[in-house]
Image (cartoon, helix red, strand yellow):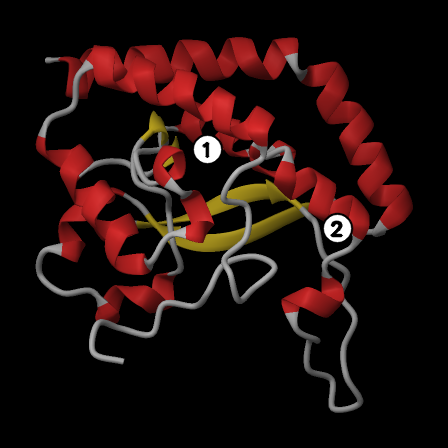
């Protein structure tokens, strides 16, 4: 019951309230991004949602558009600014995803929506992470975030889909707040953001 109707009602109500309450902060962040990084303010990208249906995710932009002589974007490390690092470390860059939650693309709690190009790389069990809507936060985010291996991330994602309860979601949200305050697991050991998933046999 909770994982269907009630969870959606709570997602809609809480995301609507959050957007209203946080609107002054969101306006200020939009202005700072425009000033420091230019346009566009938002980063938009296609991601797979529930049942691997593709949707467009919204985030605050954290990187420049600097390119090399051949017109290719530079690495994340070179394009991620100090201001962008701050937005990521505080998870402020994720706040526009409240729009996705309001629309029904995402939930407050669930496996994080990853890149579309990863879909063919998942094994049968890992595909199960798409049995539910992706979330703003999830089990993997409170158990290491980007600092843990892909295998562990997927293990937590699939574990979440097996039994979804109101109490579990509340615990995940509370733990997420704590992790954000502590700024844990923001980067992997080898990347300023997160390592690319290259499949299970590499």
Q: Can residue 123 be seen in this view?
A: yes
For the residue pair 56 and 133, the one nearer the viewer reads as 133
The residue to which callout 2 is attached is 40
Percent across and percent down for residue 151 are 24, 58
Q: Which mark is residue 119?
A: none
Q: Residue furthest bottom?
A: 70
Q: In which quarter of the image is residue 169?
A: top left
State the CA–CA distance, disc 1 to disc 2.
18 Å
Percent across and percent down for residue 3 are 17, 20
From the viewer's perspective, is 191 left or right of 137?
right
Query: Mark 2 falls on what kind of element?
Result: loop
The residue to which callout 1 is attached is 100
The N terminus, quarter of image: top left
Q: Residue furthest right?
A: 35
Q: Is residue 130 visible?
A: no
Question: Which residue does the image show at 41% across and 16% down from the upper left?
Answer: 174
Within 10 Å of the Cα at label 2, are there few (<14), some (14-19), or many (20+) other Cα atoms? few
Percent across and percent down for residue 100 are 46, 33
Query: Mark 1 falls on what kind of element?
Result: helix
Question: Which residue does the image show at 81% across and 26% down from the upper left?
Answer: 28
Question: Which residue does the image show at 59% across and 25% down from the upper left?
Answer: 181
Query: Measured along the vertical axis of the image, is residue 70 above or below residue 49?
Result: below
Query: Measured along the vertical axis of the image, is residue 106 above or below residue 17?
Result: below
Q: Considering only order in the chain, which callout, 2 or 1, is on the residue closer to the N terminus?
A: 2
The C terminus, quarter of image: bottom left
Query: Measured along the vertical axis of the image, is residue 99 above or below residue 83?
Result: above
Q: Quadrant of residue 176?
A: top left
From the viewer's perspective, is 113 left or right of 129?
right
For the residue pair 73 and 90, the one nearer the viewer reads as 90
Within 10 Å of the Cα at label 1, are there few (<14), some (14-19), or many (20+) other Cα atoms? many
Tally of numbered discs: 2
């Amino acid at each position: 019951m909770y994982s269907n109707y009630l969870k959606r009602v709570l997602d809609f109500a809480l995301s609507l309230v959050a957007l209203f309450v946080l609107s002054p902060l969101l306006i200020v962040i939009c202005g700072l991004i425009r000033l420091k990084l230019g346009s566009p303010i938002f980063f938009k990208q296609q991601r797979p949602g529930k049942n691997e249906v593709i949707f467009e995710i919204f985030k605050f932009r954290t990187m420049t558009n600097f390119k090399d002589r051949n017109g290719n974007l530079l690495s994340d490390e070179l394009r991620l600014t100090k201001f962008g690092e701050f937005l990521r470390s505080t998870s402020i860059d994720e706040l526009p995803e409240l729009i996705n939650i309001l629309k029904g693309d995402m939930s407050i709690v669930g496996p994080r929506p990853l890149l579309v190009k990863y879909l063919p790389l998942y094994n049968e069990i890992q595909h199960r992470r798409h049995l539910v809507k992706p979330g703003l936060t999830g089990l993997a985010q409170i158990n290491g975030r980007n600092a843990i291996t892909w295998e562990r991330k997927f293990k937590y994602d699939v574990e979440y889909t097996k039994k979804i309860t109101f109490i579990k979601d509340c615990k995940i949200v509370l733990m997420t707040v704590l992790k954000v305050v502590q700024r844990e697991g923001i980067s992997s050991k080898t990347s300023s953001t997160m390592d690319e998933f290259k499949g299970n046999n590499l």
